Structure formats: structure tokens, C-alpha cells
Amino acid sequence: MEKTGNQDRSRSWLPNCGGLCLKPQHYQEILQNLPDVGWFEVHAENYLGHGGAPLHYLEKIRAHYELSVHGVGLSIGSAQGIDEQHLTRVANMVERFQPASFSEHLAWSTHNDQFYSDLLPVPYNKEVEDLVCRHICQIQDLLKRQMLLENPSNYLTMENSTQEETHMLNSIVNRTGCGLLLDVNNVYISAHNCGYDALEYISALPLNAVGEIHLAGHATDTAIPDEPLLIDTHDRQVSDPVWKLYEATLKISGAKPTLIEWDADVPEWSMFLNELNQADTLLNAASVKRNFADAG
Amino acid sequence: MLDNFQLETARALNDPGQQSPQAVVGRKADGSSRRFNIYRNNRAGSLIAALQDTYPVLCRLLGSDFFNAAARQFIDQHPPSGPILSEYGSGFGRFVQQFPNTANYPYLADVAELEWQRLQSYHAANELTLTAENLQAIDPTLLLKSKLKPHSAAAMIKSNWAIGSLWANTQTDTKTQLNLSQAEFVLISRPQWNVQLKLLSSEGAMFMQLLTNGLTIEEAATQCLSNHANFDTGSHLHDLMGAGAFSTSIH
């Protein structure tokens, strides 16, 4: 592991059960009824204002629940480096809310001071591996904690890639001590779009480094009927094949803290709970099997 | 090498006429532009959604087709520089107002400015608001010589159009008849967590403006009295305080 100054780094430690993304339309519901949800996740970038309702409600909800802070704008794969001003704002937010976990993406979104508002793909090669490792160490040093790195949803492959994505993720985990945020929906999308086996991909990851799993809904682009593409939209329920892939993943990884992501066309609260219950049911089954196996 | 690739990708994202970056290939070589377009669409979709979140009333007034088309042009010409989308979109109202086909709706830029200021107020720093009790603790002659500081979440917009009434009309089912060419002074404030709008009289707005400019209560009141013979300092001060216009730091 590369030495990064601060070796006394706290590790990601989310409760090993289902969690939900926190949406403003659900603040009141949550505070009034304190529903049985293991933990909540927020996007860091939605809570970087000076004050007001978002930070107020997050503070109140944080008093009752564990929290995961998920960054979407650090642009870890940027050749031009990480925006230190933005990183400082994120670090201050993490310091204030003391989340159980902080995570970001294997992607880039900023170039020449322009923000592209999407998680853009990086090629997988030594240059990018070194760069991403440097940036992760920079983040972990400032946050004084381990971060989790999320696998992207891929729509294409790149000529300048010389490694498999799983190989690169293994190297990054080994070199930086970061954990993984395994987005099972992203794996399903990428495997479909780029033509590989989803469960083989997952089996090739260092699963003991997975600190969190993401599940979400996706859309299908059928503009070319013979070659449908899956698009990561976070605007609907988790699809059946993704639930199946999740179940198969838990069989090899054991139970992992699991988030239901839903960021657009946010439904009423009861729909969120339904999705959460499905995840918790599969997580319980995975824990029971694990316990039997341990006892045997 | 990565920097060149990202430069090429960034150019292709900014210009739909530009080919997909050379290094980008699909499973089938001919499908690469369709695949790259997913990133173009994601980017445009997320930024348009951010502008819709910031300007919901402007979107209703323009209709979503026109709004989205204008948003695409705005994104091309004024792309975001940072990843916090609630900080993106300043000036979109003035941008829209420059289109020839919005000339008959000259209040749009001010409506948008009202929505932008509401957003600033929503995220502004927390601060206690000045109350009548705070003022009662101060010797009245000293109070007249005091300066008030606008609350961190307070702002005033002066418009030649009835933008406050128009905005309020979009928030309820019971519509009131509007005279759009009636000038309005709108005070935006956030006494606690909810952003509020309050219409001010012209003398109330003048008083607020003079206090914001740093005049003492007495100086501001004297100027208001010279313009409005019946100006009642106490009642205007009370009204503004009630709306959360001032912070507790008096000096």
C-alpha cells in the first residue's frame, strides 16, 4: 500500500442492512415517523450551501440515523487534478456530519474548469491507475478516513484501455487501501452494453473490500432494436434481473450494506420502503446462509 | 495522454457536430456515436433539470418545450464551472429575455430573478432575525441612531411588473386578477427554513433600501418622510422585522 501520511484512517462502517437515499420530499415523513431504515445516503454536492433547510433537516435526521456521504463531483479521473476548493467544501461537510462512509466514482466530470455534469469514462491503463491512486490518497488524507470507490456504468469501451476494469479496481484497492462501492445495477448495465458476463466481473473484484452495494433502476434505449442499450437513470424500481444479480452477488460476498438509489421522478415514501424491504429480505437470507456456513 | 483524451471528449460534448473521440469504440465500431451520445444526453438532461429546479415558474410561463430549448442554448454559451448544480444558472432569465419571441413578455427576466433570489435565500447562512423584543431592549434615542443589517437570507427586488403577485398566483389554485404592468417591490426572506415573499409599498421599499445602504433608522426615516408625508416609521419597521428582513446585529 502507498503510504499516504495518515495511517490512522477510520474505515467505512455502514450498518450491514438496507439504506435509502435521502430526498427533500421525504424529510417530514422521516422525522415524524422515524421509519425503520438502517441508514441514509446523501449526495455531498446537495449539502454544500451556507445554511437553510437542507442542512437543518440533514442534521435532524443524522441525529437518528447513520449516514453515507456520496460525492458526485470530485472528478477523481481528471487529468488536471482535483479541484481543491471543492474538495475542501466536501471535507468540511464530512467533518460536520461524521458519516459512517464516504464514497466517490471512478470517473471524471471536469476539464479546463468546466463541469460536464455526468460521470464520464476513463480508459483503463497505467497512467490512469497512477492518477486515480494519487487522487484517492489525496482525498483519504484530507478526510482522514478510508473512501469507497464506485464502479461506473459503461456505454462503450476505449481503445486506449490496456487493462480490464476489475484489474484496475483490484490494483487501486491494493495501492490505496480504499474500499469499493459495488454498484450492481452499473455492473448489469456495463456487462450488457459492453458484452461481458456480469457475475464473472463481480467474482473478479476483491469482494472483501466492498463496503457498500448500490441498487437502482435503469432504462432501455431501443433506437436500434437489434442492439438495445441500457442507461443508468435512477428513476424507477430496480429491475428483476438486477435483483437476481444482487442475490447471486450476496451468495459470494455475504451480506453488504445496500442502498436503494432513486434520484429522478422520486416516488412516494411507501415505494421507497417496498424497495428497501426487498433488499433487506435478500440480505437477511444471505446472513442466515452465512451463519449456517460458519456454524458448519 | 489522458489530458488530450479528456480535451477531445470535452470538445465533443460541447459540440454535437463534433465526432466522438477517436479512442471511443462501441462493441460494434459503427455504434460508437450512438453510445457517445448517451453522455451528451446525460449531460444536457442533468443541466436542463437543474435549470428547471431553479426556475419552475419561468418554465411554466414559457412552456417546457421553449424552456428546454432555451436551456440548451444557455448551457452551450454559459456552461457550469463547478459541480454544485444549485449554484448554476444565474442570468438565465436575462438570457431568455433576449429572444425576440419573449419581447411581448417583458416581465420574464424579473420573474426569473425572483426565483434565483429565492434559491439564494433558501441556501443562505442561518441567522437569527431581529424582533420587536430586541428593539425594546435598546434606548429609543440610541435606536434612532442605529444601523440595521439585512438578514443573510433577505433580498429585495424592484420590478416594473407585478412579479410577486404573478409568482404567488402560480402557487395556488385560486387565481387573482393581475395587472401585470403594476410595479412591485418584493421582499424575499427566510425567517427560519421556508422562503417567504412580501410585497412592500413604495415607501416601505425605499425605507428598506436606505437601511440596506447603511443609513441609520433616523436618517432613513427622514428621507422617507420628505417623500411620503404620512410615513410611519414604527409601522414600517415592524412590518419589515415581522418578515425577517434584518439580522440581530445592530450597530
Image (tube, helix red, strand yellow):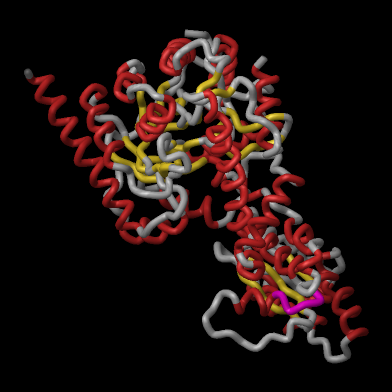
Seen as rendered, the residue at the extreme left is A296
- Residue in view at x 29 percent, y 52 percent: A273
Q: Magenta stretch: residue A137 in it?
A: no
B158 lies left or right of A118? right
Residue B234 pos. (x, y %) = 75, 82
- Within the image, what quadrant is residue B17 found in? top right
Q: Position of residue A228 (x, y in %)?
A: 42, 37
Residue B42 in picture, x, y percent from top left: 55, 42
**Does B161 appear in magenta?**
yes
Q: Is residue B1 above or below residue A93?
A: above
Q: Is residue A193 above or below residue B65?
A: above
- Looking at the picture, tell me which residue is in the foreground, A98 or A19: A19
Residue found at the far right of this picture: B226
Count all numbered tags in the image, as a single digit. Answer: 0
In the picture, the quarter occupied by the N terminus of chain B is: top right
Figure quadrant of the C terminus of chain B: bottom right
User: Which residue is painted at 24% across and 29% down in the image?
Assistant: A255
Read off the magenta span.
Answer: B159-163
- Identify the residue shown where x is 56% and y is 75%: B171
Residue B49 lies, with reference to residue B61, above or below; the image says: above
Between A14 and B211, the one lying in front of the other is A14
Examine the rendering and report whether any part of residue B247 can be seen. no
Q: In the depicted view, which residue is nearer to us: A52 or B214?
A: A52
Q: Position of residue A195 (x, y in %)?
A: 39, 24
Residue name at image x 29 percent, y 23 percent: A199
Main SS, magenta region, reads: loop
Residue A18 in view, yes or no: yes
